[in-house]
Image (cartoon, rainbow, N blue to C red):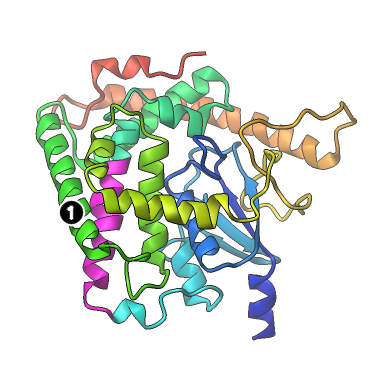
């Protein structure tokens, strides 16, 4: 028990960087950040911009303990299973729990992925994931991710309009059901925070802050005033009102690395200027890893383009406009 408590008191949450007035603008990372905030668990926030396409991010670490996003149902489920942070005790038995979670993690998650990678000009995705990389690498990684999302959603040139219509229809139904479920309550279930609040609040804040005003998904969300009030209130209390850091951290290394971190990480819209100094061994190691990352991505790009070239027209395809997403210089 003491070991569990010690772990919970020494968390470091590693996410993608902050932008769009959010502590982390990654739609996968933000719910984990909010889950820890809703649980009032103290933690340090660190950013990893070296591996933008890693499915291990976000992850929580404390000593030798690490909970990765791609393991055991994700970070939140791992924290619950290990008895470290569990906001859902007894609440998960409420009859509407499963259906509510399904709407958030499937219909709304699909709508977020569609808007971010397929239904927009790529501006938001570029800023969140690739703006710290050389432009050619960022552009190709965007196209690669867009192709992956289209495959997952089953989108082809023949059915693109039909799939888009279905995605927005499901999102509209989900917003209506969640609005009715919420009413004028502060939280979704039994007037207490839960993992579903973290998931839903993360989606709502991302949609309102990171998606453009022309976003179809954003317009459908704005039809529900009580959801907007819910998000604004919890953001003031748990994001803006908390003891949040105030300057951008240095880049993190490989998620599997055991390299020690350098104190509490901070965040803000602009990093503070620092005087020039001799590079530490840690920074030299990060630089070598970054070079290795770029080299492996070049190989991945070549393989990816050769694979795309080998697909026939009946399979999932990229549109003609995929050549020119927003990520110009």
**Is residue 11 visible in the rendered structure shown here?**
yes
Residue displayed at 68% across by 67% down:
64
* Left or right of residue 33: residue 182: left
Q: Position of residue 224 (x, y in %)?
A: 24, 48
The N terminus sits in image quarter: bottom right
Asked if 96 appears above or below 247 in the picture, the reply is below
**Bounds of the magenta span?**
94-112
Mark count: 1
Residue 195 is drawn in which quadrant? bottom left
Main SS of the magenta segment?
A: helix
- Taking the view exactly as shown, the residue that stands out farthest to the bottom is 1
Describe the element under mark 1 as helix, strand or loop: helix
**Is residue 33 visible in the rendered structure shown here?**
no
* Left or right of residue 272: residue 237: left
Q: Which one is in front, 305 or 264?
A: 264
Magenta region includes residue 23: no
* Left or right of residue 195: residue 138: right
Residue displayed at 51% across by 23% down:
137
Q: Which residue is mark 1?
A: 176
Residue displayed at 77% across by 54% down:
260
Q: Position of residue 265 (x, y in %)?
A: 70, 48
Asked if 82 appears above or below 259 in the picture, the reply is below
Q: How would you rate the neighbour count of disc 1 (Cα within 10 Å): few for under 14, some for 14-19, many for 20 or more?
A: some
Asked if 191 appears above or below 137 in the picture, the reply is below
* Left or right of residue 255: residue 212: left
Q: Position of residue 12 (x, y in %)?
A: 65, 58
């Amino acid at each position: 028990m003491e070991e569990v408590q010690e772990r919970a008191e020494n968390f470091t949450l590693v996410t993608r960087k902050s932008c769009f007035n959010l502590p982390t603008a990654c739609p996968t990372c933000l719910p984990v950040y909010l889950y820890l905030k809703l649980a009032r668990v103290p933690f340090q926030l660190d950013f990893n911009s070296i591996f933008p396409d890693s499915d291990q991010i976000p992850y929580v670490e404390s000593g030798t303990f690490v909970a990765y996003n791609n393991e055991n149902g994700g970070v939140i489920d791992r924290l619950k299973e290990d008895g470290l942070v569990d906001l859902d005790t007894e609440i998960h038995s409420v009859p509407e729990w499963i259906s509510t979670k399904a709407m958030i993690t499937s219909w709304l998650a699909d709508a977020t992925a569609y808007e971010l990678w397929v239904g927009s000009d790529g501006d938001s995705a570029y800023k969140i994931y690739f703006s710290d990389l050389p432009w050619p690498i960022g552009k190709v990684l965007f196209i690669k991710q867009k192709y992956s999302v289209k495959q997952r959603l089953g989108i082809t040139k023949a059915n693109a309009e039909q799939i888009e219509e279905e995605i927005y229809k499901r999102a509209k139904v989900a917003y209506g059901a969640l609005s009715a479920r919420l009413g004028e309550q502060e939280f979704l279930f039994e007037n207490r925070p839960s993992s579903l609040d973290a998931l839903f609040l993360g989606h709502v804040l991302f949609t309102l802050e990171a998606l453009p005003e022309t976003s179809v998904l954003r317009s459908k969300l704005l039809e529900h005033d009580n959801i907007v009030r819910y998000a604004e209130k919890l953001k003031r209390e748990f994001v803006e009102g908390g003891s949040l850091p105030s300057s951008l951290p240095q880049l993190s290394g490989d998620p599997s690395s055991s390299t020690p971190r350098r104190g509490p990480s901070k965040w803000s819209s602009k990093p503070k200027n620092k005087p020039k100094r001799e590079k530490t061994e840690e920074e030299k190691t990060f630089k070598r890893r970054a070079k290795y990352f770029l080299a492996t991505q070049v190989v991945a790009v070549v393989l990816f383009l050769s694979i795309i070239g080998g697909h026939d027209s009946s399979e999932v395809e990229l549109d003609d406009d995929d050549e020119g997403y927003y990520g110009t210089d």
